[in-house]
Structure formats: C-alpha cells, structure tokens
Image (tube, grey):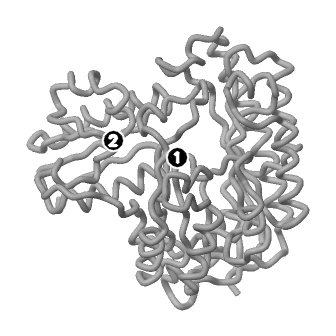
Amino acid sequence: MSGVEVINFGCRLNIAEGEAIRAAAGDKDDLIIINSCAVTQEAERQAAQAIRRAAKRRPEARIIVTGCAAEINPERFAAMAEAVRIVPNRTKANPAHYGGLSSHFTRPAVSGSDHARAFIEVQNGCDHRCTFCIIPYGRGESRSIPAGAVIDAVKAAVDRGQQEIILTGVDLTSYGPDLPGSPTLGQLVERILNHVPALKRLRLSSLDSIEIDDRLFALLTGEARLMPHVHLSLQHGDDMILKRMKRRHSRAQAIAIVERLKTARPDIAIGADIIAGFPTETAAMFENSVSLLDACDIVFGHIFPFSPRAGTPAARMPQLDRAVIKARAEQLRSAAAQRKAAWLHAMIGSTQRALIELDGLSGHTDAFARISLAKALPQGNMRGTMIDVKISGADAHGLIGIPL
C-alpha cells in the first residue's frame, strides 16, 4: 500500500476533509486515519468497528482517530487499545498531527480530485442548536472560508478538468458573517461564477430554507450554471414538532419557498431531509411529514429514523418505540421512492444533458437524476465529458439513456 490510508464516514464535508487529511499526512505507509461521524449512535459504532478491523487487517500500522465522533466521545476511542492517538476535529488537516510541520489553514477541503465533480468546503460548524443534533458539539461555531481561497480551489478543480463543483458546509446558508464585510452565500456564488467563467456546473449542498435570501433565490432560479437542484433541510412537516426540534421555519414557510422556486424555475428538483419518529410525534403529526412530500414536490427524500444522541435535548424527551420509528421511516421512504419513480418516468422520451463520471458509463443530469448509458460511447471512456442523452427508460436507480 502506498501512502496514508484514510477511512471516511458521514457527510460530504467529512469526505472532502478526508482528502485534506491525506495531503497533510503525506506519504506514510504505516498510518491509518479513521475520519469518524457522530450524526447517529450507529455512525459512532461503525467507526469503532472500523478501528478494530483496520488493526486486525494491518497490525503493523498506527491508527489515528479524528472526526465528529472522536470529538464528542473521545473517551470511547482513547480507551481502545488499537487507537494510538485522537486528533481534534478542528485541526485534523494540520500536518503536525501526522509528523509534518504545523501550519495555519485557510484553504478549503476539496474531495474528488480524480473525479468529474469536486466537493469544496466553504463553511464549517454551526451556531444553531437543533434539539436532535449533536454535530455543533463536534464542529464548533460557524466559520467561513474566505472567497479568495474558495475561488482558487474552484479554479484548480476546473484546471484539472472537473466541470462540476459542489459547495459544501455544515450550515451552508450561514456562510459569511464571520468574514470581513459579512458576505453572503449568494455573493460567494456570484464571485465564483464571475471569476471562473470556464466552470460549467455549480451545485450547492443542503440549504436551510429560511435562510434563502433574495440574492440567492435569484441565482437559484435565474443562473443557468447553477444547477436546478435544491436540497432543503426541512426535517419535519408538523409545526409543533418543528418547534420541538428548534427549527426556525414553519410548514407554511417551507411550502412557500418551494412554490416560489418552482414558479420561477419549473425544472428545479427538490430534495429534503426528513426525520421520522421524533419524540412526541403522534400519528397525525407523522402524516404531516408524509403529506409534505407532495406539498413540497420532493423527489429526493433523504429519510432518517430518529436516533437519540446523549447530550442533546431531544434525547431527554419522551421517546417513541423503536419499532414505531422504524415503521414510520419505511413508510416515508416508500412514499418518497414512489414520487421519485414518477418524476424519473416523466422524463422518458426527453433529451437530458449529463456529465459523465468516473466509470465512463454513468453520470447525473442537471437536476441531479442519476443516468446510466444503455451503450458505451464510441469514443471510449468519456469521464468528465458533457453529453446529450436520449432517455429511453428508468429503473429504481435512475434514468437509462442513449448518448446522442
């Protein structure tokens, strides 16, 4: 094996940070780094399992643990005989942790250097305290990457031949107040598009619907290079549960922003995170989440069964039976899958623009529908190429099409 081995868990931001860790650690064949996640108890368990498996697979290697789980529950990992060191989440890309020279970091983490798309960190941490979420305790307060550093990272990715950039963060729409002049996410997007004219596609990761201001709304609905795919952090469809979650929007506000987006740009595909089985959730409250799928025209439903995290207010609330939580999550997933299938089938017969990705035989449309080519391109591997595809079918995985 050549170079450090990094094992990532969790969100896209964590994966992007994994690449920064790999670069910071350098060419060390005897080092395994576990970049953990803490969003659920299961994620923490998986990190511990990965440590044990890595030690068994490579007993000669040193194992370092970092990430949100190691930040929130360091005692658990420090007690494991297999782990030699716990690295703070905030400074995990500092070479000093891995035997290099210490340095001050203002560069964004970037992942996917060998892919058609690149994920670029622009924000980290969170100033909000949703009652179910442990992540702010592992990530700290909200902090932003200066626009100049982000633009440099975007330019570098485009120069590598990557035609699509995804901006990532823990609370992406909170970008900017900590920087000089208090820029907004909309201003950052404008600067990227103006300074990197060669960039073909720009996407944003999860957005807090209540923080989509007029400038960002205008870009989402009127800028052709900003893709028609908006993923919203909605979490629930019932107003009482939203209050108990300490979310800052109401059901009506969530529906209203989607209606505005779809009216201004009808081809926008809506995705959303929804939690099933939050404490005190009644059957009627749950049905409000089910009906939210239709009310917000959600075609990418990311459904999560509620998982209590020690130290959060929601963990101290009256809990639902785990079987009820599981059943409700499955019902939501089924309803979301039906909506996505109908959306995909409606595109049969159309022509869609697609960016071909790593395997050369699949990619994503502008609206982020996954597409598989029914036949290989005569030019051979076309990774990173934008092509038009005639949609001939759809299955549970996405669209099927013939390259034109």
Residue at position x 13%, y 58% from top?
A: 101
Could you classify mark 1 by the number of other residues whose Cα lies within 10 Å: few (under 14), some (14-19), or many (20 or more)? Answer: many
Of labels 1 and 2, earlier in sequence is: 2
At which x and y percent is residue 239?
A: 82, 27
Residues under labels 1 and 2: Cα distance? 13 Å
Asked if residue 62 is positioned above or below residue 311 in the image, the reply reads below
Provide the secondary structure element on which disc 1 rests.
loop
At which x and y percent is residue 377?
A: 58, 85
Residue at position x 18%, y 40% from top?
A: 63
Residue with the most extreme left position: 60
Q: Please identify the quadrant where the C terminus is shown.
A: bottom right
Residue at position x 59%, y 26% from top?
A: 132
Amino acid tagged 2: Asn
Drawn side of residue 188 relative to residue 371, left or right? left
Callout count = 2
At which x and y percent is residue 55?
A: 18, 37
Residue with the most extreme bottom position: 379
Residue with the most extreme front position: 181
Q: Which numbered circle lies on residue 89? A: 2
Residue at position x 50%, y 86% from top?
A: 380
Asked if residue 205 is positioned above or below residue 319 in the image, the reply reads below
Provide the secondary structure element on which disc 2 rests.
loop
Drawn side of residue 222 relative to residue 294, left or right? left
Could you say which quadrant of the image residue 251 lies in?
top right
Could you say which quadrant of the image residue 326 lies in?
top right
**C-beta proximity under 8 Å, tags 1 and 2:** no
What residue sits right under mark 1 in the picture? Answer: 170
Asked if residue 349 is positioned above or below residue 292 in the image, the reply reads below
Amino acid tagged 1: Val
